[in-house]
Structure formats: C-alpha cells, structure tokens
Amino acid sequence: MIFVGQLFFEPTVDIGLMGILHERTWVVYYDTKVSRLLVFSDIHNDARALERLMAIDADYYFAAGDLVSWARGLEQIGGIMQARGKRVYVLPGNHESEADIAEFCKRHGFVNFHGATLEIGDVRIAGLGYSNPTPFDTPGEYTEQELAARLAKFAEFKPTVMICHAPPLNSPLDRVHDGLHAGSRAVREFIEKVQPAHFFCGHIHEAEGKVTQMGSTRAMNVGKRGYLLEI
Ligand SMILES: [Zn+2]
C-alpha cells in the first residue's frame, strides 16, 4: 500500500518516482500483507463449481459445509481440492458427520476447522459446522442448545470472522420462501452478542449470495459461488 499525503513543506526534490512526486509531497510505504480468504459452502458434489473456486488464488480456502450430499462422493471432491492442500479448511455441513470430515481432512492433508480457531495477524477466525435440526434427518445436525453451547466457547476469543454452516434465524440469509425461515436461533444470538466484523454461512441454498447487516456484523450466505475476503 502506498499512502500519499501533502502535509510537509519540503524543498523541491526530484526523487524520480514515476514523475508523480512534486514538492510538498511525501510518500509512505506500508508493508501490509493482505490475506485473501475464499469462503464457500454447499458444493453438493458440483465438481465444476469447486474447480472454479480452486482456480481462484487465495491464501486460505474455507469450505463451510456440504461439500457433498449424504456424505457420498468425498473422494472425488477431495481430489479437486488437493492442490491447495494445507490452505484448505473444512467444516462439516449437515450432510457430513464430524467423523466423515475428520477422516477426509486427515486423508487429504486439509485442516478440520470444526470447532476450531485460527489467527492471522490480529484477525481471529472461528468455525463451527453442522446445522440446527432439519426435516430430513441428515447426519450433521445439532439441537439449538448444542449449537449455543459450542458457539459459547468462541465468545471470549471474540472472532473477527465467524464461519458457520447454519445461517442466523429470521434473516435474509435463512429465507427458504415467503414466510419460512430455517436458520438457527443460537447462531443469531451469538452474532447479536459477540458482533464479529464478518459472518459467513451457507445451508439455505435459496439465500445464496444474500448479505445483511446485523449491528456491526456484515453477514453473508456465501453458497457455492463463494466470497473472497481480503483482510
Ligand atoms: Zn446444503
């Protein structure tokens, strides 16, 4: 990053920087390393969508759950992400169990990010997979009480970026259709209380790409198109 100000009264000096510098101009070079976080969700075995995401150059890749449906086809999906290896962080969605994702990460050298945290400089990132109960009895569901208890462990960590599979209840991010919202109350309460700068989720496919402001939190359902955050 280059910052150009005009506060100093310096004698005319030609320091030959692309001819853009004049007298009374000073330049500061900040050594700022920007990290690029690509967050996506709900691939559901769509190999082409995942290939497009893996072609994007990022420092971290966060898969926020449901890479596959009913835990089937993880092998093929793992092969597509293999090239990004240790930069891939994975949460189980409601379609994968904790054990499925633990084994999957171990086999491919990815990071199992379920219930885990990561610090990049002063940016704190936390992840929690699974959804609140669904009508489909999928393998990765928690009760609202379980979600609340697991999220409570992050309250003191005060994440800057919180990534969950489940969206907050009664928001544009969990709207299935008119009048029907299927998100999590515990997730909503966590966002309201802890106010991470960024919240990312998936799970409700109809709400892919939706963004909303919840106090000081910018919340987004990333879906399989994904979102690239620069921090
Ligand atoms: Zn899904």
Image (cartoon, rainbow, N blue to C red):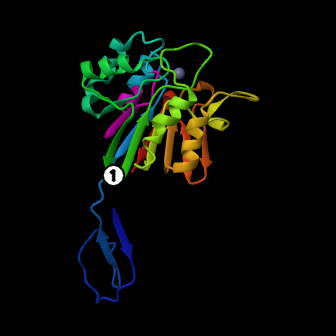
> Image quadrant of residue 111?
top left
Residue 65 sits inside the magenta stretch: yes
The image position of residue 91, as x and y in percent, is 41, 28
Residue positioned most to the right: 179
Disc 1 designates what residue?
34
Task: Tell me which segment is drawn in magenta.
Answer: 52-66
Residue 76 sits inside the magenta stretch: no
Q: Secondary structure at mark 1?
A: loop
Q: Residue at x 68, y 36 (%)?
A: 170
Label 1 is placed on what type of residue?
Val
Instruction: Tell me: residue 18, above or below residue 183.
Output: below
| Residue situated in front as seen by the camera: 36 or 165 | 165
| Residue situated in front as seen by the camera: 166 or 77 | 166
Where is the N terminus found, in terms of image quarters?
Answer: bottom left
Instruction: Tell me: residue 82, above or below residue 138.
Output: below
Residue 124 visible:
yes
In this rendering, would 215 be left or right of 81? right
